[in-house]
Amino acid sequence: MTTDSELRDLLSEAAAGPAVADWDLVVRRGRHHRRMAVARRAGGVVVLAGTALGLGSALVDGGREETVVVDQPGETTTTTTPPAIGPGVSYPIGADARATGAFVTISIEPADPSSGFDPCLDRLPVVAERADAVTIAVRHRYDAPTSSSWAACQSSAFSGWATIELAEPLGGRPLRDENQREIPVIDNADLLFPTFVPAPFVHEAWDEFGGEPLVDRTFSWSADDLSLSVRNAPLEGSVPLGANPGDACEGGEPTVVRGQEGVLCRSSDRGHFVLLWDEGGWRRQIELGPVSDNTSPFTLDDLMAIADSLEPVG
């Protein structure tokens, strides 16, 4: 017969399962994206290259959530098992996601033009959906069910992102990868996206980057040596706009953006601009201009037209 002491030891041992390894998604960046990452690290926010974040609960035995009860008569162990994905090789998913209703957008691998690899064609989602949780994996197209498909997908040599349509709105259900790492979800209504971008950018073709800590999303356009980025990031404490050493716009001139106080930095001889302001509990940033020391055709009017065109993603 098992004694009370032995039972407690067995339950304690079962509750101390192995740690779950984090995913790392390495996104190759061009010169502009490397410069953006350096600037954000200096300001306290790092652009996502696929850094996996912490778990939302204790995980044991390969991903089961387990609560041990030893002091209440008639109760032993209560186990909640998230929906599982079947066997097969999976590929990395970014550290966070964004969602509107039943549509969930995740970060996936970038494309490799030199080899012809395109994750939008070569990868497909596998989804296990339940009333209380959703699990997502990304598989090779040959290993995914024939019913699998992306609702939308876009990739470049710098980033990849794809949208999945669930059977029901995500709501408050946790989103997990197949290792049962919980993927934090940003509400698209909190993210601003431009409805206008100046030529030569193509509005429908953008790179998308997530970030740390959690709620951070940058939409980026490139054309030859020219670049445009629209960043949505959490407010960073009480640091005034443009006053943090290392900010993309340290010591900028005060300006009004969308009815809010902001700061503007510009290099009039190059046509390079950085605009910062706080709106809706988020810090917004637009950067427009050349990647190198070349000049660009952009003006302050172009920059403000982009800002004025911003609307929630969903």
Image (spheres, rainbow, N blue to C red):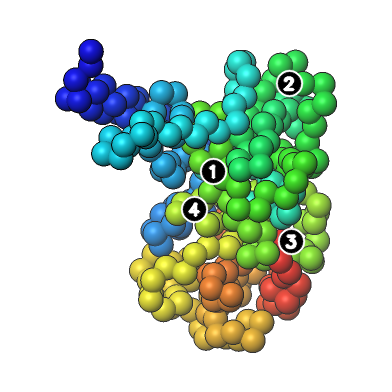
Distance (Cα) linking label 4 and label 2? 29 Å
Q: Earlier in the sequence, mark 3 or mark 2?
A: 2
| Image: 304 above or below 232 | below
What's the mark number on residue 314? 3
Q: Which corner quadrant holds the C terminus?
A: bottom right
What residue is at 55 percent from the left and 33 percent from the top? Answer: 82
Can the viewer see residue 63 in this picture?
yes
Question: Disc 1 marks which residue?
Answer: 183
Q: Position of residue 158 (x, y in %)?
A: 62, 40
Q: Position of residue 150 (x, y in %)?
A: 78, 36
Q: Earlier in the sequence, mark 2 or mark 1?
A: 2
Image side of residue 108 versus residue 69, left or right = right
Question: Disc 2 marks which residue?
Answer: 144
Q: Secondary structure at mark 1?
A: loop
Q: Would you identify the image quadrant in which residue 187 lies?
A: bottom right
Q: Would you identify the image quadrant in which residue 77 lies?
A: top left
Q: Nearer the viewer, mark 4 or mark 1?
A: 1
Distance (Cα) linking label 3 and label 2? 28 Å
Distance (Cα) linking label 1 and label 3? 19 Å
What's the mark number on residue 214? 4
Q: Position of residue 290 (x, y in %)?
A: 63, 59
Q: Residues within 10 Å of mark 2 (few under 14, many from 20)?
A: many
